[in-house]
Amino acid sequence: MLRNWIRNRAKIAGQKKASRRAQEGNTKGKEHKIEQLLFKEFQEARQQGKAVRCQWFRRHAKALYRQQYPDRITQNPETQRLLYSGFKFSNGWFQSFCRRWRISNRCQTKTAQNPPEDYREKVMS
């Protein structure tokens, strides 16, 4: 690691202060087209107020993969499960996808509940 730091001294010195590392390599995922479509679906779901979790991403990514690459999918005759050749929808892929597209998957906090209308009328009078 030290050898790499010495070799890349100029690049490291040119980075912004307090940055963790320079943007290296490919910032696109293996299946960039699918990730773009998935991000659009994510934005639409968030605008509709839907809860979007990890399994939502995997389910929709697999559906997009089936649409884009039907020739890469086979079905196991014993278990009837679909096998995706050439791509794994792993936890590492999901974390990298969220980092690439700057998605943070957090719970909404500090949301007040609205009391029923009849309760408001009782309190106001």
Image (cartoon, helix red, strand yellow):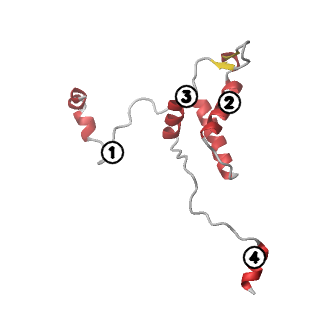
In what element is the residue under mark 1?
loop
Splitting the image into 4 quarters, where does residue 113 fall? bottom right
Q: Which of marks 3 and 1 is nearer the N terminus?
A: 1
Q: How far apart are marks 4 and 2 (CA)?
A: 47 Å
Taking depth in this image into account, of 77 and 2 the one nearest to the observer is 77
Query: Which of the marked residues, 2 or 1, is nearer the chain's N terminus?
Result: 1
Quadrant of residue 42 within the rendered picture: top right
Q: What element carries label 3?
A: loop
Disc 4 marks which amino acid?
Answer: Tyr
Of 114 and 33, the residue lying toward us: 114
Which residue is at 65% across, 48% downward? 51
Q: To which residue does mark 4 refer?
A: 119
* Front one among 27 and 83: 83
Q: Mark 2 points at which residue?
A: 64
In terms of image quadrants, where is residue 86? top right
Residue 38 x/y as whole percent: 63, 37
Number of other residues with Cα within 10 Å of mark 4, as a class: few under 14, some 14 to 19, many 20 or more = few
Query: Nearer the viewer's eye, disc 3 or disc 1?
Result: 3
Which residue is situated farthest in the bottom direction here? Answer: 125
Q: Distance between the residues labelled 2 and 3?
A: 16 Å
Give the residue drawn at x 22%, y 34%: 9
| In the depicted structure, whether residue 53 falls above or below residue 49 | above
Question: In the rendered structure, are the residues bearing label 2 and label 1 in contact, judged by CB atoms less than 8 Å apart?
Answer: no
Q: What element carries label 2?
A: helix
Q: In which quarter of the image is the N terminus?
A: top left
Which quadrant of the rendered structure holds the C terminus? bottom right
Kindly report the distance in space between the C-alpha atoms of the residues bearing marks 4 and 1: 52 Å
Depth check: give the residue in front, 28 or 48.
48
Q: Mark 3 points at which residue?
A: 90
Find disc 1 in the rendering and name its residue: 19
Q: Decide which of tag 4 and tag 1 comes sooner along the chain.
A: 1
Nearest-to-viewer mark from 4 and 2: 4
